[in-house]
């Protein structure tokens, strides 16, 4: 049987990246899977080529409305829609369809956190699509619903989880992350105008107000086995893709630099997409662009007794679409790395 895969939100950045990866996925290339409905919102009725100039093989595809009728008849449906849109669409699809949601709707376990940060009623919680977390692969294999993490939670969680899980760090973390503008999606926003972005770096969502704060705390709390306080500050920098996160936590008494490195070596030795860089090499966004890799480097700053972890990710690849494909592979029983590269595009 040929698997049919639909992408809702195909004109957006996340939808476009899912399609770029699917076009090179071995199951699509050898015909075991095919790309079916591509849908959009106000741009339904136009062709994909008008919106995604890099997706040449799909140029002539006409974009469908995003509804039950157009998404029916697919074994896999990727939702790359604005927050709050996924629940209604998901409800209309059968329980056997594999739905992979790139939005936030089903990521949080705590309904009060959801309402506080997103301002609406909580739709529910789906298996969380970060396979590198303990037990996640088991939950994702055979799953028919997946909530893909946010881009900052992906990189921050992978940066700090090992230190907390190994009991090396106090459960209070500080994260400052520089991000490219594609993280905000492609709809017009004044603060993303070229004249506001070029030659400028600015913080936003400061003082614990960014909606990724509870998602990061949820993940790290599972590692620490206790509530973790999270101070998170994102910053916009003039690049289109990539996140570089600087993360730190106070080291527990007696912890050495060797302890820290050993914990990360152990955590990531067998992870296909997380690389603890050799001593002296620090993560940079250009090294991971277009790839599903997360680059991590650790240090113990003895002058202040803090564990420092730097991590880089492509927000659209491992930070969204690549993570989504990795979860699809697991859910369908395909090799986890199928269609995903660890090699970035640099410079
Ligand atoms: N960009 C990123 O780095 C990341 C994004 N995500 C998440 O992925 C999702 C998509 O993000 P992104 O691609 O950046 O956003 P974009 O704004 O780039 O794309 C949004 C897509 O949704 C469609 N759409 C908008 N409104 C509706 C509607 N009412 N009904 C149907 N379709 C609609 C748009 O179609 P049209 O062109 O017709 O308006 C477009 O295809 C979001 O939930 C986002 O939070 C998650 C992690 C990182
Ligand atoms: C630059 C920028 O605006 N980035 C986005 C990150 C979006 C993301 O990762 O995803 P979700 O919206 O799916 O949670 C932001 O900070 O809101």
Image (cartoon, rainbow, N blue to C red):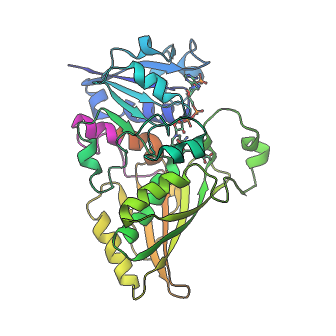
Q: Could you tell me residue 21's position as x and y percent?
A: 40, 36
Q: Residue at x 42, y 42 (%)?
A: 148
| As drawn, 208 above or below 305 | above
- Res 62 seen here: yes
Does residue 127 appear left or right of residue 187 in this picture?
left
Residue 36 locus on image (x, y percent): 38, 18
Segment colored magenta: 326-344
Ligand 1 in which quarter = top right
Q: What percent of the width, then of the height, locates residue 83?
A: 55, 34
Most foreground residue, 13 or 308: 308
Q: x%, y% of residue 240?
A: 61, 46
In this rendering, would 183 be left or right of 275? right
The picture quadrant where one finds residue 34 is top left
Residue 205 lies in magenta, yes or no?
no
Identify the residue at horizontal 29%, vertical 45% (top origin): 337
The front one of 284 and 100 is: 100
Which residue is drawn at the image coordinates 27% and 65% (left, top)?
A: 269
Residue 141's place in the image compared with 305, above or below, is above
Total labels: the figure holds: 0
Q: Does residue 295 appear in this view?
A: no
Q: Quadrant of the N terminus?
A: top left
Q: Is residue 299 above or below residue 199?
A: below
**Above or below 3: residue 131:** below
């Amino acid at each position: 049987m040929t698997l049919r895969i639909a992408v809702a939100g195909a004109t957006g950045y996340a939808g476009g990246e899912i399609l770029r990866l699917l076009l090179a996925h071995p199951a699509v290339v050898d015909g075991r899977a095919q790309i079916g409905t591509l849908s959009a919102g106000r741009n339904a009725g136009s062709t994909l080529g008008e919106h995604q100039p890099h997706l040449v093989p799909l140029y002539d595809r006409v974009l469908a409305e995003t509804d039950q009728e157009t998404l029916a008849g697919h074994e896999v449906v990727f939702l790359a829609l604005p927050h709050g849109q996924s629940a209604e669409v998901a409800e209309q699809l059968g329980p056997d369809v594999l739905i992979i949601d790139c939005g936030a709707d089903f990521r949080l376990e705590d309904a009060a956190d959801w309402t506080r940060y997103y301002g609406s009623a909580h739709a529910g919680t789906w298996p969380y699509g970060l396979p590198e977390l303990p037990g996640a692969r088991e939950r994702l294999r055979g799953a028919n619903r997946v909530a893909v993490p946010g881009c900052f939670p992906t990189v921050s969680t992978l940066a700090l989880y090992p230190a907390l899980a190994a009991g090396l760090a106090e459960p209070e973390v500080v994260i400052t992350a520089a991000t490219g503008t594609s993280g905000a999606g492609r709809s017009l926003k004044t603060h993303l105008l070229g004249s506001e972005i070029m030659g400028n770096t600015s913080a936003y969502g400061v003082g614990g107000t960014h909606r990724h704060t509870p998602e990061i705390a949820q993940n790290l709390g599972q590692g620490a086995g206790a509530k973790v306080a999270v101070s998170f500050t994102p910053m916009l920098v003039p690049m289109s893709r990539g996140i570089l996160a600087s993360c730190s936590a106070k080291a527990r008494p007696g912890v050495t630099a060797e302890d820290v490195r050993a914990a990360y070596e152990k955590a990531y030795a067998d992870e296909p997409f997380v690389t603890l860089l050799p001593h002296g090499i620090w993560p940079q966004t250009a090294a991971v662009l277009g790839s599903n890799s997360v680059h991590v480097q650790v240090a113990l700053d003895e002058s202040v007794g803090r564990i420092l972890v730097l991590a880089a990710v492509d927000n659209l690849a491992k930070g969204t679409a690549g993570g989504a494909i990795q979860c699809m592979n697991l859910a369908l029983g395909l090799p986890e790395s199928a269609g995903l590269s660890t090699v970035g595009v640099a410079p």
